[in-house]
Image (tube, rainbow, N blue to C red):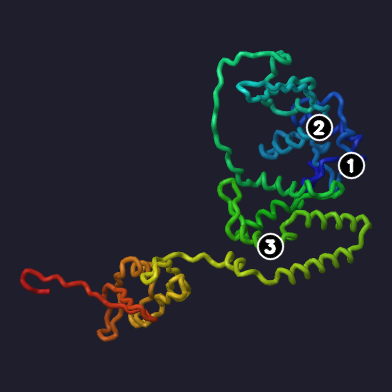
Amino acid sequence: MTLPRTDSRFLTDDLEPSVPELAAVAAAICETTAPEGVNAGQVCDSKKVSDHHAILPTASAGKADTSVLPLGEREILRLVAGQLLRAVSDAHRYAETTVTLECGGTEFTAKGRTVLDTGWKQYLAQEKRDAALPELSEGQVLDCTEAVVKEGKTAPPKHYTEDTLLSAMENAGKDDIPDEAERKGLGTPATRAAIIEKLVAAGFVERKGKSLIPTKAGINLVTILPEPLTSPMLTAEWEQKLTEIARGGADPDTFMDGIYTMVQEIVSTYSCISEDGKKLFAPEKEVIGTCPRCGQPVYEGKNNFACSDRSCGFVLWKNDRFWTSRKKELTKKMAADLLKKGRTNVKGMWSEKKQATYDAAVILDDTGGKYINFKLEFPKRKVGADGRK
């Protein structure tokens, strides 16, 4: 096949004489016959070719044994060959009838098609055909033997998959971009897949099965970005100017000066992110428990477990001397127990006096002051039948 990295759908005019031969090659690949009249002119237009002409099977493919290709490669080749056959075939022609009927004061419509000329659709897999309508005349009364009212719910739009997102990137802003623009959409056929991979690697998009889901970081980033940077129009405008430069119709220095000015304006206008914007990127805090003083959530920080209400003042410090003197650190589980039950069982605490370890329950003893106090409760010793402990 020819160069695959192109989004052009036309061939250059100089290729027109070779199209009938390529159509014969394509027909052999697809194990079918070429159209009787190959319409080469409708696929050749040099003005509509950008960096490279449309993807084609090469003449050498007609001399090769394509059956030795791996299945995936063979099917891709057949797709390209089949598309060429459809592109040079006659139009698909049909007659469509639309009928408007009234029943119970409500209008209904029905459509039916009759194929007049199969045309390019002869190279498609057998598809579902619209049923032909019976002979009808205006004002005719039909008997309704059975009518059913069905209720349902519309489904929300599905998440993008790799294929649908690539298509959306190709068509982004298409309606707003001038017809004379040579390249439309976001990225190029060679870069669109790589752009998606960069978004996944950066944590802005994640894969769930076949779906691509925006992460919270991705949504937040789009929320604070300046509008010009999120519009496909910017890409289209730059691509159009670069094309003009390549053709000698524009000055590259003027183009770069325009970008320099735009960057200056964006940096000066959006150099400070609002407080609400900063909060969007604050790391999510895990709720450890409920504050015993005010009932607000308690979050884990780098050095403590603190009440979310700063005016409350309730804090459990991880490096509190109560813990460091006993060679222990206040863990998340221990803090959660203290907040929920007012106590936590700790094993292996160190006694400076006895130079030994011991187990005990640590009791939260909050008196409402600046610092939190703790008490120890030791397990009761069992007394045997002979009175020994």
The quarter of the rendered structure image containing the N terminus is top right
Check disc 1 and give the amino acid type.
Thr
Dot label at residue 225: 3
Q: How crowded is the residue under tag 1: few (<14 C-alpha within 10 Å), some, or many (20+)?
A: some
CA gap between label 1 and label 3 equals 41 Å
Give the residue at x 66% y 59%. 222
Front one among 28 and 46: 46
Q: Position of residue 304 (x, y in %)?
A: 44, 75
Residue 119 placement, left or right of 108: right
Q: In which quarter of the image is residue 214?
A: bottom right
Position of 364 relative to 321 (above/below): above
**N-term mark: 3 or 2:** 2
Task: Examine the rendered structure and indicate whether residue 265 appears above or below residue 354.
Answer: above
Q: Which amino acid does label 3 sit on?
A: Leu
**What separation in Å lies between label 3 and label 2 (alpha carbons)?**
51 Å
Please indicate, yes or no, whether residue 323 appears anywhere in the rendered image. no
Q: Which of 92 and 57 is in front in this view?
A: 92
